[in-house]
Amino acid sequence: MRSTFMGLETARRGMFTQQSALYTTGQNVANASTPGYTRQRVNFAQTEPYPGVGMNMPQLPGQMGTGVKAESVQRIRESFLDVQYRGENNKAGYWQARSDALSKMESIMNEPSDSGLSTVMDQFWQSLQDLAVDPTNAGARSVVRQRGEAVGDTFNYLSNSLSAVKRDQKDQVDVTVKEINSVVYQLDQINKQIGSVEPHGMLPNDLYDERDRLVDQLSSLVNIKVDYVKSGGNADPKAEGKAVIKLVDDNGSEQGVLLSNAGYNKLNVNYKGADDSVNTITVGAQTIDFSKMNSSGKLRALIESYGYEKDGQSTGIYSDMLNELDNMAYTFAKEFNDVHASGLSPNEIAAGKNDEIPFFSGASRADVAFIIDNTGSMTVPINNVKTNINNFASMLKDQGIEANLGLVTYGEVGETGGDPAKNALTTDISQFVNYVNSITMTGGGDTPESGLEAIMDPNNGAISYDAATGDLKHIILVTDAPVHDVTDGKSTYSITDVANALLQKGIRLHVVTDLSNTQLQGLSDPTGGLFIDINSPDFGTQLQKIATNITNDIGSKKGYASRIDVSQAIKDSLDNIATATGSVPSAATLGDSSNVKALADVINQPFDYGNNSEQSDFRNYYQNVIGGMGVLSQEATRLTTNSTTLQQSVDQKRQSVSSVSLDEEMTNMIQFQQAYNASARMITLQDELLDKIINGMGTGGR
Amino acid sequence: MSQEKLIATMEKLLKLHKSLYDLAVKKTEIVKANDMDALNQLLKDEQAHLAAIAKLEQGRQQLAADLVQGMDQPTPTLSHCLNVIEGEDWVTLDRLRSELLDAIVQIQQRNDLNQKMVYQSLQFVNLTLNLVSPQPQAEDFNYGPPTKVNKPGATGLFNQKA
């Protein structure tokens, strides 16, 4: 038996469903300008027909439909366009960050211009030419000094500005990492919320929209791949599920999991590479080596400009440019100093000796470690050190270098008082004299002693003194006997190994010993130190030679561009500028300008500026460096424009699919409204039928 | 003198390249807007340009060969011509050469962008096609003995016979 009110119920269902469709249309129209909103539509489905099959089913014709229901509300979104968009967004993020970094560097280097390095070097060269015309002209000398200071200032400024921007990049990396972690955390929260709605059979469309917006944001920072995992329960087959986000490289292979069903992993950048550069990135428990990670995105661009470790060296846009500046400044200063030191200045001619004055200096402090043999025969040399140390320190101070002195005593390892004993570095000369006074002599005589241990012992050897980069590092070994080495079995070190270790640390070792003790020359020669006679009657003069060597040392190449400055001697007196050549001071004349010409030539001579066995002169090398930077910057700008255009084009396609078109919504409104009206009309009809049955039947002829 | 003719040819070449670059810029906008008719029209314009450039290029090579008759170079280039000419003409020719190089680099970069955009659109089109077209049956790739069973065949999303 069909029910009485079946038609009424069917029409009622029609009205309700059309109403829900109108509600959804209203929702679309209201959200027409919400960013990230995807239009929704209602899926209509028929309700179960009557009667169902079974043994006791009523014998009615066919199965009659019973109306309509709103089965689900679904988003209209094209997931392939999402994938395309995220790819383009990722590339755009990378090139954008990279071109920003490069354009900042370009504006600092400021070439070609009136204030760039090449103009300053040209002016310096010009001033040398002017001095060559009349070497006695004090005005020309003053100009040379001024221009020299300008060269130093320019290098300092470039190096410091680049370092400051490099530190900025590091801050930006940290900010980006925080952003990534924050977005992944938000995604995790949304995943959980979606996971609690979907098992009920409903589709959380607004949560999906929010999740897509966050994934878009994440894709510009790192390269990711998104997969979806079904939430169980009574989930609708159209439900998207929870997102699993993996960090991938540019070939698509997976490198780490950022977000999964179980939770999220934090991303961290580790600065443990050479020179504080980035070496690895950890995602949760997984560590990825940055130089092998090919995943593009804003994070990678920022790390590349800051500096990362590759093959044990720190490389990166800013690191490389700072290295180039150091290379140029160091090589130029060293060659210039060599030519200048070999020349004679008016002061040197008047004094009658060549003081080997450097033009450029490189450091303000020198760590000088004295290693003194404390065996019985050394009483006289130790006294000599004590009496002459003040003179030594003041010689260094005159050149603007503060002496930081240290003392290591040694004898025969194993004998009492024979192990290396180290005293702390101090700038107080009287404290150093106290150290020397407190040396207790042990036995030993003239047999070999454990000198190499005194250098190399990791706790008590001179090599363990902690020197800041940029300070000059020197060791003065005072002994009258040879040292044990691997050949006589009483030491674990060999002379060549020790020399290499010293070279690697940039330490110069000077030897004060008996001139017949040629074994120790194997330590002083490779490191650039002096070999001095311990038995010389005028110990003070010998120490002075070492002091001169120290003041001519401009220190290590690393960071030299930020330290380069005109030396104290030149700043004190213009007459210290070496204009004349010749090895005999008494035969030199004040009007001889040949050294100035040689100095002016330094800028034109080919040297190995890049430390890669290729020779070029200063201008060519600098042109190469600037040209390389310009090419990188131009490419980055071009690719930024390209990838932004592509990203916008995909976004337009995406919007054409998912955004609200008011015309379409209006048309749909008409459709749903008329369907609503038609259902309402059906209800009126059913009402009339029922009215006829109830009030008009069975009263025969009334 | 063939020098003036060479300079005139270079000027025309430069103008054509510049308008080719404008066409490339327009193409980017058209591809963004997905406008097929305009794209077809543009392609015809481009063909006309390319034909004109090819002809001018031939003429230029001929003129260059005339200028450097002395040396036996199989393909005389502008650099060789620059060695032979001097004075004002040299300055003009040098300027034209660098401007032409710039224009060519610009066209190249713009074409790179256009290519990437068309590739992107093609990805989408291919995806859609793969969704609606039937998958080829693995058994149909080779000949084989005729089987009695009538395979229904994959019909994709549409019933094409209807």
Image (spheres, grey):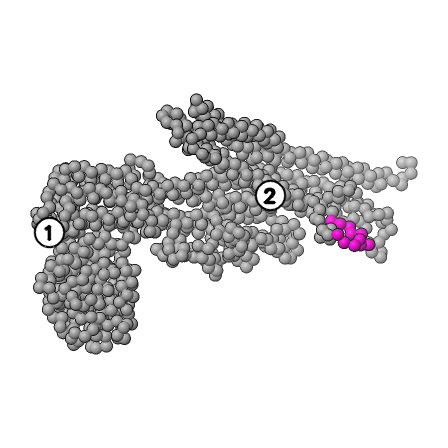
Q: What element carries label 2?
A: helix
Q: What residue type is labelled 2?
A: Gln
Q: In which quarter of the image is the C terminus of chain A?
A: top right
The magenta segment is B143-154
| Cα gap from disc 1 to disc 2, whole angstroms | 81 Å
| SS class, disc 1 | loop
Q: Which of A46 and A246 is in front in this view?
A: A246
The quarter of the displayed image where residue A270 is located? bottom left
Residue drawn at x 48%, y 61% is: A285
Residue drawn at x 14%, y 52% as measured from the top left: A355
Would you say A479 lies left or right of B79 here?
Answer: left
Give yes or no for residue B151 being in the magenta stretch: yes
Q: Relative to residue B162, is residue A341 drawn left or right?
A: left
Q: Which of B19 and A44 is in front in this view?
A: B19
- Residue beneath the point at 57% across and 30% down: B47
The percent position of residue A624, horizontal first and vertical second, equals 35, 43
Mark seen at residue B123: 2
Residue, disc 1 = A353
